[in-house]
Image (cartoon, rainbow, N blue to C red):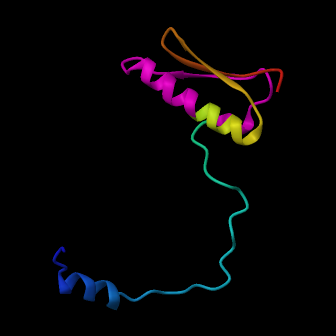
Amino acid sequence: MGVVEVSRVTKRQLMPVEVESHVPFPTEKGCYLYPFHTMNAGDSFFLACEGYDQLKIRNNLGSAANNYGRRHDKKFMARQVEGGVSIQRDASR
């Protein structure tokens, strides 16, 4: 069994907490790092990444695009091109 510092527990228990009333709930869900939500079928964007690991960026960006597409019934394709990564939205969806 681990040892718990009494001072740490006491500080957490005594920390004042304010409750706010009538705070408006955000209407937009999430904050998007990439413009997937603004892309129409056939649109694409280029992310310059010279001096960085392009394969890693393509994998991360492609994964983000596919996750967004799965949630919103859209399809994207990530390609590693000279000087960066290109993301294109499929025209069929």
In the image, residue 60 lies in the stretch drawn in magenta: yes
Q: Is residue 89 above or below residue 26?
A: above
Please provide percent x and percent y for residue 43: 74, 23
| Left or right relative to 92: residue 56 | left
Please provide percent x and percent y for residue 84: 50, 17
Please name the residue shown 61% across and 50% down the image: 31
Decide which of 81, 5 is in the foreground and name it: 5
Please name the residue shown 69% across and 70% down the image: 25
Decide which of 36, 7 is in the foreground and name it: 7
Please provide percent x and percent y for residue 15: 35, 87
Stretch in magenta: 35-63
Please name the residue shown 54% across and 29% down the image: 61
| Left or right relative to 58: residue 71 | right
Please name the residue shown 79% across and 29% down the image: 40
Which quadrant holds residue 85?
Answer: top right
| Left or right relative to 57: residue 15 | left
In the image, residue 49 lies in the stretch drawn in magenta: yes
